[in-house]
Amino acid sequence: MKGGRPRGWGWLVWLLVPVVLAGCGRRGGNDHDDARLDPSVSASARPDDDGEGPDIGDLPVPDVEIGSGGATGDQGSGSGGAGDTETEPEPEPTDPTQEAFRAVVRGTCLPVYRDGDDWNTSVPPDAVSCRSERAGLFEVTRTVTGGASCPTGTGRDRWSHHSSVTGETTTLCLNRVWVKDYCVLAEQSGDTITSVGASTAVDCSATEVPVPYNQVLVVAAVYRAPAGAGASHCRTGAHDNRRYWSLLADGGATLVCFTSRS
């Protein structure tokens, strides 16, 4: 019996020795073997000595598409972003009356006239044929701005508009188109007509006229002026006993004859 016990314990010792050796090998070589098996791992990607994770500054930045539907793209410089502070420029101020004056075409005729010192309208009306039979009719000879002047003389006038919006002045230079059988205003002293309102027009049956006028004259005829033209050239024949007054328009080229209304 004593001789069999030692022999049984011996086998048990030989069985435990390999197990103990295998356990020691795993515990002692684990860290070294891991680094050797993965040589691509850089020092910055390994845990630091203090146990913290990798440095964020060493990580690659993902590409972000500006203007995409993501939250980051919405904060970009797109037109709908919250940071878009660009504003539309305010339009330049305009003056419709000034635009109407500047739109008048040279050489066209306007149905306008003075009803005293003032024009009968504040805005140029639509142009009409220069052959129209109207009490007041003027041909536009030019349009000027600022302080430019217009030609002067009998039957010539200027119609200006100063814009309080733009501060600019626009002027239409006008020349009267004389039409037979229509009436104008005049000033009379005794039997003498002292002046004719060459830019005026009035109803031939008017009973009241604006100051300083006190008479109404009828345009009896319009002629190409002969040499030395005057009221004597207005008579239609030897038996025409009417009283005439006359003026020379268009720089002396046109003779305009007037009579008093009957």
Image: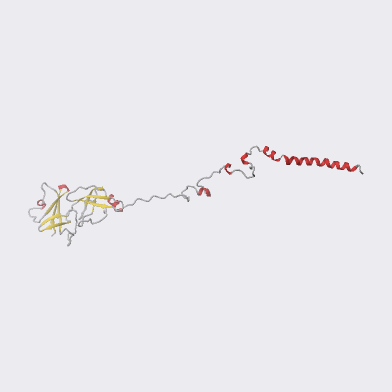
Give the position of the C terminus as an image quadrant: bottom left
Quadrant of residue 113 within the rendered picture: bottom left
Query: Residue 103 versus residue 158: which sits nearer the camera?
Result: 158
Name of the residue lying farthest toward the right: 1
Query: Residue 130 versus residue 149: which sits nearer the camera?
Result: 149
Number of callouts in the render?
Answer: 0
**Residue 118 locus on image (x, y percent):** 22, 56
Quadrant of residue 202 within the rendered picture: bottom left
**Residue 112 locus on image (x, y percent):** 23, 54
Name of the residue lying farthest toward the bottom: 207
Query: Residue 108 versus residue 11: which sits nearer the camera?
Result: 11
Q: Is residue 37 left or right of residue 160?
A: right
**Residue 121 locus on image (x, y percent):** 25, 56
Query: Residue 147 versus residue 224: which sits nearer the camera?
Result: 147
Q: How is the image coloured?
A: secondary structure
Q: Residue at x 81, y 42 (%)?
A: 16
**Residue 229 locus on image (x, y percent):** 11, 49
Q: Residue at x 76, y 40 (%)?
A: 22
Q: Is residue 202 left or right of residue 87?
A: left
Give the position of the N terminus as an image quadrant: top right
